[in-house]
Amino acid sequence: MALVSERALKTLVEVEGESILNAAVERGKGIILALPHLGCWEMVGLYGADRMPMTSLYRPLRLGGLDQLVRSGRERNGATLVPTDASGIRSLYQALKRGELIAILPDQGARRWR
């Protein structure tokens, strides 16, 4: 998804109920976006971060070069990626308090807490 243009992204994504998200943002309420790791999560992340501040949990990939490509694609619209540990959970909570969008993949298991 790092190579998809903004124009292509806007023509490929359609959001049902986007007015509900917009209303929450206008009220200064944080939004929790919990999606299964099914479909094109990358597009959801790009779309969300393009519209509002967004923080999401991120577990680095084992292949360093591929990890850098994925990370840069996810961060290109301003998304903040936080680790899948206690510090990341604190960051999500702080983002919610600021009225931002947080995104998690609840079907992705976390590593042991440290």
Image: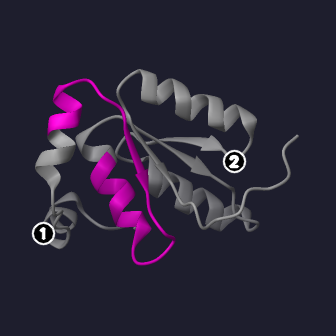
Where residue 42 appears, as percent x and y from the top left, is: 42, 65
Residue at (55, 61) in percent of width and height: 69
Image quadrant occupied by the N terminus: bottom left
The mark nearer the N terminus, 1 or 2, is 1
Quarter of the figure with the C terminus: top right
> Can you say whether 86 is above or below 77 in the image?
above
Q: Which mark is in front, 1 or 2?
A: 2
Q: CA distance from mark 1 to mark 2?
A: 32 Å
Magenta stretch: includes residue 3: no
| Front in this rendered view, residue 37 or 8 | 37
Q: How far across and how far down the image is residue 64, in percent?
A: 72, 61
Where does residue 23 sit, x and y in percent of width and height?
A: 15, 36
Q: Secondary structure at mark 1?
A: helix
- The picture places residue 17, in percent across and down from the top left corner, at 15, 57
Q: Are marks 1 and 2 in contact (CB under 8 Å)?
A: no
How crowded is the residue under tag 1: few (<14 C-alpha within 10 Å), some, or many (20+)? Answer: few
Instruction: Please state the total of marks drawn on the protein image.
Output: 2
Q: Outermost residue toward the bottom?
A: 39
Residue 37 drawn in magenta: yes
The answer to whether one can see residue 17 in this image is yes
> Residue at position x 54%, y 60% from top?
105
| Residue 2 in sight here | no
At label 1, the amino acid type is: Thr
Label 2: element kind: loop
- Say which residue label 2 marks: 84
The stretch of residues the image draws in magenta is 23-48
Q: Amino acid at mark 2?
A: Thr
The residue that mark 1 highlights is: 11
Taking the image as shown, residue 106 lies to the left or right of residue 26, namely right
